[in-house]
Image (spheres, grey):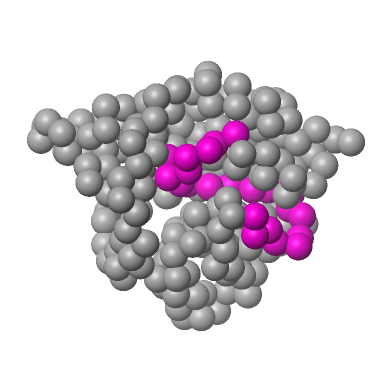
Amino acid sequence: MEQKQKKQPDKTYFDQAAASWEDNPARIELTRSVADAITKQIPLSGAMQALEFGCGTGLVSMRIAGSVGRIVAVDTSAGMIEVLEQKIRENHISNIQTRLMDLTDGAFPAERFDLVFSNMAMHHIKDIPHLLAIFHRLLNSGGYLALTDLDKEDGGFHGDIPDVFHYGFDRPAFADWMEAAGFSNISTTTAHVMKKKNALTGLPAEFPVFLAIGRKQHL
């Protein structure tokens, strides 16, 4: 799978974007579709302990929090975490806990989870197989993995956003990575289609977003 060259890191990009992150109606619509797709395809329950990787301002976590017991929301952006914590306080939510943490650097929660999910974060990860192995390690036996990201595209989705390592993904190749990491019962479906201007051509374009689901085998 082709990777793009890493741009010069900009550690402040997501911190600066956090305050206006939810001003984008297309992003709100995306996360609604993703949360609905996860809810329909995975049997969520109040007994579930969940982890969201790359939670951002918690748009997906906020939508499924009522269907699970607890969510640990993890992100590397202090600005995003701050916005999410404010929402948690304002909405009196007791079952979402935030962690400023980078799983790819070897910092792991002590807990184990029944569900690990992530929305549109995988293209920011250089070594996908390594992260999938971490997700597998963090899941309880029989736990679910649910990941959304872009289908393979020409680079026009993000434009100049820093630290984008992948121009989307080929679904069968992504499923192969999941299987190699130990997941089974893998499926990929279209969760949403984002409509926006292609940053390369300036023309209206459609960018499908897939939901990949796998399960850690019962031991």
Residue stretch in magenta:
106-129
Q: Position of residue 128 (x, y in %)?
A: 54, 36
In the rendered image, residue 92, in percent from the top left (x then y), is placed at 55, 79
Residue 176: within the magenta? no
Vertical placement of residue 8 versus 158, above or below: below
Toward the top, the furthest residue is 172
Question: Which quadrant holds residue 196?
Answer: top left
Residue 104 placement, left or right of 79 = right
Q: How many numbered marks are there? A: 0
| Residue found at x 30% / y 68% | 16
Classify residue 197 as left or right of residue 116.
Answer: left
The quarter of the rendered structure image containing the N terminus is top left
Q: In the rendered image, which quarter contains the C terminus?
A: top right
Q: In this image, 212 relative to 204: left or right?
A: right
Q: Is residue 149 visible?
A: yes
Which residue is found at the position 77% from the left and 55% from the top?
Answer: 112
Instruction: Point out residue 22 in the picture as x, y percentages from the top left corner.
Output: 32, 62
Image position of 136 with respect to 114: above or below? above
Place residue 108 in its image quadrant: bottom right
Q: Is residue 115 magenta?
A: yes
Q: Nearer the viewer, residue 181 or 151?
A: 181
Q: Residue at x 67, y 45 (%)?
A: 134
Would you say residue 144 is visible in this rendering?
no
Instruction: Relative to 88, say whether 147 is above or below.
Output: above
How far across and down, in percent of the image, does residue 8 sit? 30, 50
Q: Residue at x 82, y 42 (%)?
A: 141
Q: Is residue 117 left or right of 49 when viewed as pictured?
A: left
Q: Is residue 4 above or below residue 33?
A: above
Q: Residue furthest right?
A: 219
